[in-house]
Image: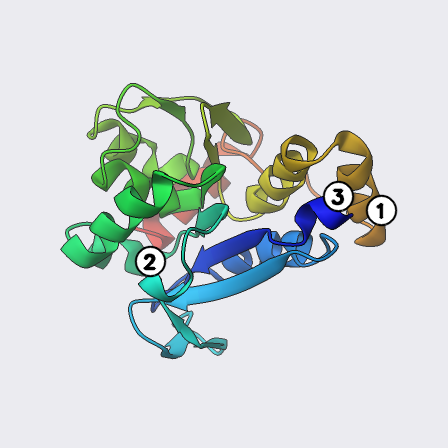
Amino acid sequence: MDIFKNLKIVVFIYDRFTALDAIGPYEVFSRIPNAEVFFVALKPGIYSDGQTLSIEVKHSLNEIEKPDVIVIPGGFGIDSLLQNREILDWIRLTHNTTQFTASVCSGALLLAAAGLLKNIKATTHWNRVEQLKKYGVEVVNKRYVHDGKIITSAGVSAGIDMALYMISKLANEKLAQIIQLSMEYDPQPPFNSGSPEKAPKEIVEILKKVIK
């Protein structure tokens, strides 16, 4: 797998990120032979998901030059970054040379704020759809959406699906399937309530109140 010898993948981290948004894709990408996966932030330091998980980030935004892939995870902290010029400029500049620019969940809002989703089909967490539409984005109700070199994924767990799909495009379906099997990623949830279309209306309404 020498084709991945110089492959650089960057996952952006910030305070109050959603853990699986970042760690899910990281786990998938970390299994690519010879690829390098980096966590980056505005500046090196310890970043918390707002609960009990913290990640030590050793690299600042511009420290990893010309990454092949950038991933913007979602989280409750995303709203405080939507007008951060340094982050938006980094996204725009890095996007110029990536093979793929990706987001998980509400991370799509940061791509939209950077102007990357104009005239682009995209997806996000179901509770962020109306917010994303305000940027003029054509929101599609799918687990992940590939448009050009931008791949957006829906809420939280969908980032794993997106990462596996991306590997099929970076390399081939065989490698993606090998990694999926190595992770034993074979979702069989105990309840059929993983989307607002499937979940009981009562459950949807309760969650809307909780995550406002």
**Number of residues whose C-alpha sits closer than 10 Å to that of mark 3, classed few (under 14), some (14–19) or many (20 or more):** few
- Indicate which disc residue 76 carries: 2
The mark that comes first in sequence, 2 or 3, is 2
**Number of residues whose C-alpha sits closer than 10 Å to that of mark 1, classed few (under 14), some (14–19) or many (20 or more):** few
**Number of residues whose C-alpha sits closer than 10 Å to that of mark 2, classed few (under 14), some (14–19) or many (20 or more):** some
Task: Give how far apart the Cα atoms at labels 2 and 1 are.
Answer: 31 Å
Q: Nearer the viewer, residue 196 or 7?
A: 7
Q: Position of residue 43 (x, y in %)?
A: 30, 74
Residue occupying the point 48% across, 78% down: 52
Q: Nearer the viewer, residue 77 or 202?
A: 77
Position above or below: 157 against 38: above
Task: Give how far apart the Cα atoms at labels 2 and 3 are.
Answer: 25 Å
Check if mark 2's residue and mark 3's residue have beta carbons within 8 Å: no
> Can residue 177 be seen in this snapshot?
yes
Q: Nearer the viewer, mark 1 or mark 3?
A: 1
The mark that comes first in sequence, 1 or 3, is 1
Q: Nearer the viewer, residue 17 or 43?
A: 43
Q: Position of residue 170 (x, y in %)?
A: 64, 36
Q: Amino acid at mark 1?
A: Leu
Residue bearing mark 3: 187
Q: Amino acid at mark 3?
A: Pro
Residue bearing mark 1: 181
Residue occupying the point 61% across, 43% down: 163
Q: Is residue 41 left or right of residue 181?
A: left
Element at badge 3?
loop
Position above or below: 39 against 93: below
Q: Position of residue 177 (x, y in %)?
A: 81, 38
Q: Nearer the viewer, residue 187 or 56?
A: 56
Q: Quadrant of residue 58?
A: bottom left
